Image (tube, helix red, strand yellow):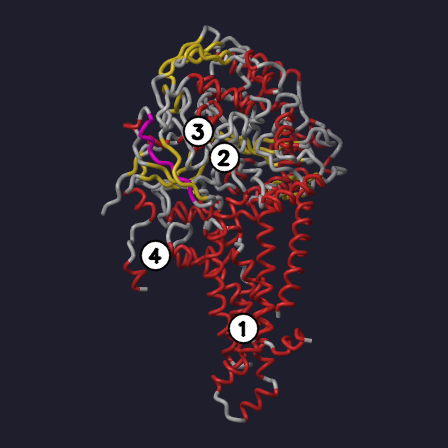
């Protein structure tokens, strides 16, 4: 006890702050720091600290994009051909970053034998999809480096939003020399992205990594903006459990948590009112309806199910205010005007739902088969499913059974179309409505509802070749309107991020994509 | 004794082989695969990944390759989810953590459970017996996912030096070890009490009492040796389970041990990691049971004579 009493009373976060180390909750153990193998959001946050692409994000305004490895760029009138002029910058081992590193990186992720899981992110490049499927040679792909400091990207159509795409880690360069030194371009077991071998061009380099414990990155002295990096490093804690993470924050174990679960919102607000944050997030929570199966192949049934959902109650009572009721799919933002839809009053919506169900042949729910609602085993998903189950029973008189699956079984069933209704969520990879609306292309891999419409596909195609940014957004809105009319999904709410941030943290602002440049974050030193 | 040892080792090899084989085929029957992600992979990418790791071959061929790599090269294989990381590396990082926690947890369990069980047996049907057995029943009934957050909130946040979660300080082990220990202490207390009650009513104890042997000597010298037998049988598998980690305790206290990998590898379908973890668990169970058998033989003269016969 004497020993305990004599121990330093500063918390872990305060001790880290004194060393200039920012401690953040990062939701899960990173699976890979190789930008061509990573897919998880948690991995992306670390990779964005370790590598820098052609451009870099702003800490306050996501619409504002700064030069990164490219000091300037230009494009043709159609925004189809882009030329980037690279600055003099160096990898952490002192080798220069060249345009060939970008070409090497793009070739690697797209190489048919490499099996890049996120290769589709580069499909806007001319012939990238064909090369990825082994249907053409690399020379046909729209990537070239006329010299060491010039990178030319040719897109398959007008791409005015390319700069936003470039913020995603799949577009970052990799050190060709380091990858080659550790097994070569196609070696998926390469060690170049592991502690002790890491070479990067970002604000930080990889420090220690202990599975399920911590991953640390430390300031990169060779980073071209090294003088502007406002902390000495970042410690990522892979805390999966939101309850544990909230307790850790309240006990002074971290500066920024990742997520406060709905059940702990009241406690978090009461215990740490100055730390509590609730930010809009580019994420939609919705239910997929399997339109291949009766009676969900009838649009009237699908609309009845959607109208019967009381979204306001769902947001208020289930997610405790951590969201906004959604009547469309794409979250507001990025200058995108949501398709205008009439939102009925609660009574009118319920009446219309009953009318549609009766019209489909199930008056008062009579004769309606028992449908199965598939959810993951997460607490909030189960509670949400139970509340919708009750709403449908009360409003439509139909019974829906809940099937709670562990994550992989759930994804397998969803992707194979083995479900009636499936709880789902979708978060944007980049700040553009296309990251949401493109989901609903006929036969698209992530559509999973069996629904498709030639009119919607045509609108998406028109958006891909639209001459102006305004026209493009108009076509995307048209595609979304068509999808919402057919109702292969039930939008529920647009998620908001609830987390805790120490008042000592400066330079962290609400961002829709949650893609915070950590080098801009400063810690106020704890008082001694 | 050596014969018993060799016999048990041979049985252990069979157990580990069967365990590995059953696990190998069972995990492949689970829906999904290691490469499933939030977004659906194009078919050509999925095919390439399956081919790269040999998952496109028949289960029997994969099974043969697995044993070949394990026996000839001592290779557990790569993690299919954390590509570029070997299963052996993951286990090498996580096992020492679980071992430390397990040993501490077992110390707590033994130091609390055995004295409580002895005292309850000695004061049988009196209030100490009722009190300790009520506590033990509570320890068995209250799951660790309730004890862990309560310990974190009540002790971790208020006692200086203790930690609600994390693994960045030696004292971080206190609460998870206490949580693990309390649950096991409850079982050990009940088993010790049961064993001791039986022994304390035996004729040789009555004789010893009649001869005027003092209570402490009676308990510790005459009764304890036989009274501990049920608890010792339990200690082996319990110790193996403790040092291979507890998912609940590791999740609640953010401990980077084996328990988290055990459950996550299964939900992620990380086939080789599951095999590696099951292999470790199997070997530890076999070894722990072997040690228990030897201890039981040492404690129980009847078993010794059976072994000799």
Query: Which sits in the foreground, A393 or A171?
Result: A171
- The image shows residue A162, relative to residue B268, as above or below, that is above
Tag 1 residue = B133
| Disc 1 from disc 3: Cα separation | 55 Å
From the viewer's perspective, is the residue at label 1 or at label 4 nearer?
4
| Disc 2 from disc 4: Cα separation | 34 Å
Query: Which sits in the foreground, B88 or A315?
Result: B88
Res B161 label: 4
Q: Which chain does the residue under circle 1 lie in?
A: B
Q: Which chain does the residue under circle 4 lie in?
A: B
- Rendered location of residue A287, percent (x, y): 61, 34
**Dot 3: element:** loop
Main SS, magenta region, reads strand
Residue interval drawn in magenta: A214-223
**Dot 1: element:** helix
User: Total marks drawn?
Assistant: 4
Q: Are marks 1 and 3 in contact (CB under 8 Å)?
A: no
**Dot 4: element:** loop
| Disc 3 from disc 2: Cα separation | 24 Å
Q: Which chain does the residue under circle 3 lie in?
A: A
Horizontally, residue A49 falls left or right of residue A15, namely right
Q: Are marks 3 and 2 on the same chain?
A: yes
Tag 2 residue = A32
Tag 3 residue = A512
| Disc 1 from disc 4: Cα separation | 32 Å
- Dividing the picture into quadrants, the one containing residue B241 is bottom right
- The image shows residue A491, relative to residue B214, as above or below, that is above
Looking at the rendering, in which quadrant would you find the N terminus of chain A? bottom left
- Callout 4: few (<14), some (14-19), or many (20+) C-alpha neighbours within 10 Å? many
Q: Are marks 1 and 3 on the same chain?
A: no
Q: Are marks 2 and 4 in contact (CB under 8 Å)?
A: no
């Amino acid at each position: 006890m004497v020993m305990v009493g004599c121990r330093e009373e500063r918390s872990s976060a305060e001790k880290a702050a004194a060393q200039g180390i920012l401690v953040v909750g990062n939701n899960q153990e990173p699976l890979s720091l190789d930008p061509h193998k990573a897919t998880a959001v948690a991995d992306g946050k670390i990779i964005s600290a370790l590598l820098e692409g052609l451009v870099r994000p702003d800490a306050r305004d996501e619409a504002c994009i700064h030069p990164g490895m490219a000091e300037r760029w230009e494009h043709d009138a159609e925004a189809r051909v882009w030329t980037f002029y690279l600055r003099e910058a160096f990898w952490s081992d002192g080798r220069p970053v060249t345009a060939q590193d970008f070409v090497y990186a793009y070739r690697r992720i797209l190489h048919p034998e490499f099996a890049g899981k996120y290769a589709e992110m580069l499909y806007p490049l001319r012939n990238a999809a064909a090369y990825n499927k082994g249907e053409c040679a690399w020379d046909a792909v729209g990537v070239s480096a006329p010299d060491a400091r010039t990178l030319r990207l040719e897109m398959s159509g007008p791409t005015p939003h390319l700069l936003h795409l470039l913020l995603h880690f799949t577009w970052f360069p990799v050190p060709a020399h380091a990858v080659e030194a550790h097994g070569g371009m196609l070696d998926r077991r390469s060690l170049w992205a592991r502690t002790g071998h890491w070479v990067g061009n970002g604000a930080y380099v990889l420090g220690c990594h202990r599975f399920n414990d911590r991953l640390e990155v430390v300031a990169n002295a060779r980073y071209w903006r090294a003088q502007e990096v406002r902390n000495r490093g970042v410690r990522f804690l892979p805390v999966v459990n939101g309850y544990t993470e909230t307790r850790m924050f309240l006990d002074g174990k971290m500066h920024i948590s990742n997520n406060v679960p709905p059940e702990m919102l009241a406690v978090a607000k009461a215990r740490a009112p100055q730390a509590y944050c609730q930010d809009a997030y580019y994420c939609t929570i919705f239910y997929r309806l399997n339109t291949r199966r009766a009676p969900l192949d009838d649009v009237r049934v699908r609309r009845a199910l959607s109208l019967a959902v009381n979204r306001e109650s769902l947001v208020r009572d289930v997610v405790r205010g951590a969201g906004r009721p959604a009547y469309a799919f794409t979250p507001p933002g990025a200058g995108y005007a949501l398709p205008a839809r009439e939102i009925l009053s609660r009574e009118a919506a319920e009446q219309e739902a009953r009318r549609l169900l009766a019209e489909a042949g199930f008056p008062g729910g009579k004769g309606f088969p028992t449908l199965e609602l598939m959810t993951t085993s997460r607490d909030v998903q189960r509670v949400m499913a139970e509340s919708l189950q009750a709403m449908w029973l009360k409003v439509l008189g139909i019974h829906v059974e809940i099937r709670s699956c562990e994550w992989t079984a759930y994804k397998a069933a969803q992707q194979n179309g083995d479900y009636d209704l499936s709880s789902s969520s979708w978060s944007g990879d980049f700040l553009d409505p296309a990251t949401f609306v493109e989901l609903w292309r006929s036969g698209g891999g992530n559509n999973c509802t069996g629904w498709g419409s030639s009119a919607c596909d045509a609108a998406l195609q028109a958006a891909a070749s639209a001459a102006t940014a305004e026209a493009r957004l108009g076509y995307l809105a048209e595609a979304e309107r068509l999808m919402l009319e057919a109702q292969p999904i039930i939008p529920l709410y647009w998620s908001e991020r609830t987390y805790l941030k120490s008042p000592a943290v400066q330079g962290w602002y609400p961002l829709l994509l949650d893609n915070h440049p950590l080098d801009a974050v400063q810690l106020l030193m704890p008082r001694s | 004794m050596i014969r018993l040892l060799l016999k048990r080792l041979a049985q252990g090899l069979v157990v580990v082989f069967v365990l590995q084989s059953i696990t190998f085929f069972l995990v492949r029957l689970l829906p999904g695969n290691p490469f499933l992600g939030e977004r659906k992979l194009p078919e050509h990418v999925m095919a390439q990944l399956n081919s790269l790791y040999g998952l496109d071959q028949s289960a029997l061929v994969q099974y043969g390759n697995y044993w070949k790599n394990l026996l000839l090269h001592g290779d557990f294989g790569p993690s299919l989810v954390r590509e570029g990381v070997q299963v052996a590396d993951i286990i090498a990082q996580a096992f020492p953590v679980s071992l430390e926690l397990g040993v501490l947890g077992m110390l707590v369990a033994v130091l609390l459970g055995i004295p409580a069980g002895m005292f309850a047996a000695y004061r049988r049907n009196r209030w100490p017996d009722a009190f300790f057995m009520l506590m033990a029943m509570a320890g068995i009934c209250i799951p660790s996912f309730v004890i862990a957050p309560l310990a974190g909130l009540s002790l971790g946040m208020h006692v200086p030096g203790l930690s609600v979660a994390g693994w960045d300080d030696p004292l971080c082990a206190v609460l998870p070890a206490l949580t693990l220990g309390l649950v096991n202490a409850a079982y050990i207390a009940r088993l010790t009490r049961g064993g001791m009650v039986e022994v304390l009513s035996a004729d040789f104890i009555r004789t010893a009492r009649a001869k005027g042997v003092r209570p402490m000597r009676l308990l510790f010298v005459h009764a304890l040796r036989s009274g501990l037998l049920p608890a010792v049988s339990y200690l082996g598998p319990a110790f193996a389970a403790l040092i291979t980690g507890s998912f609940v305790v590791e999740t609640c206290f953010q401990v980077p041990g084996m328990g988290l990998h055990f459950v996550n590898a299964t939900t992620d379908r990380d086939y080789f990691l599951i095999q590696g973890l099951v292999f470790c668990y199997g070997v530890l169970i076999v070894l722990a049971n072997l040690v228990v058998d030897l201890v039981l033989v040492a404690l129980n003269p009847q078993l010794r004579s059976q072994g000799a016969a």
